Image (cartoon, rainbow, N blue to C red):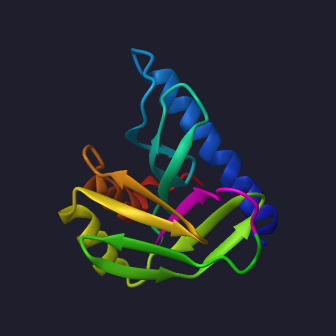
Amino acid sequence: MLGARGHVLMLRCLKVALLIGLASPAVAQEREWSLGASGEDVFLAFGVPETVDIGVSFWCRIGGKGVSLFAPVPGPSTDALKVALDVGGNAYDLHAKISDGSIEAALKPQGDVLAALKAADRFALTIGKHKTTFPLAGADFDGLVAMCADKAGVVE
């Protein structure tokens, strides 16, 4: 369980999704990639603007050292779900924390996973027995990494 920090993170994700959606000039019905920051966190989210529909997001603490993946758990969840990424034929098993119908998993080895995501046109996320493929067109991983590393951007 993620506890209080997990709940705060989920609320921040929803807040960022709403802020990103409200900033969009047109109403879209399809998911798209959006990069944004809220407080001391940065999010690269794949969702429908102006909604809380987020299929997957990558986030970090500004000035922190790690990027994590955050996604809803499809169907009933247990603490024993296997979570894996398949990017460009490379498989990455992720240690995920499950809380309130969502998973959070640190990308490890981070450099390898991020490099693979930048080079690919899509990735598959497997949570338990459910596999979803996400397109990467428009995903600004360079911007995410740059904003994550920006220690000057931390709001105290």
| Residue 58 counted in the magenta span | no
Is residue 111 at least partly visible in the picture?
A: no
Image quarter hosting the C terminus = bottom right
Picture residue at 71% right of the left edge, 69% below the top? 98
Q: Is residue 31 left or right of residue 52?
A: left
Picture residue at 64% right of the left edge, 65% below the top? 103
Picture residue at 58% right of the left edge, 70% below the top? 129
The residue most toward the left is 119
Residue 5 picture quarter: bottom right
Percent of width and height locating residue 148? 40, 61
Is residue 107 at least partly visible in the picture?
A: yes
Q: Nearer the viewer, residue 53 or 80?
A: 80
Image quarter hosting the N terminus = bottom right
Q: Is residue 103 left or right of residue 144?
A: right
Percent of width and height locating residue 149? 36, 65
**Image height check: is 78 above or below 71?**
below
**Range of magenta residues:** 66-77
**Image height check: is 81 above or below 119?**
below
Percent of width and height locating residue 30? 42, 30
Q: Is residue 59 left or right of residue 91?
A: right
Picture residue at 76% right of the left edge, 56% below the top? 7
The residue most toward the front is 129
| Residue 72 counted in the magenta span | yes
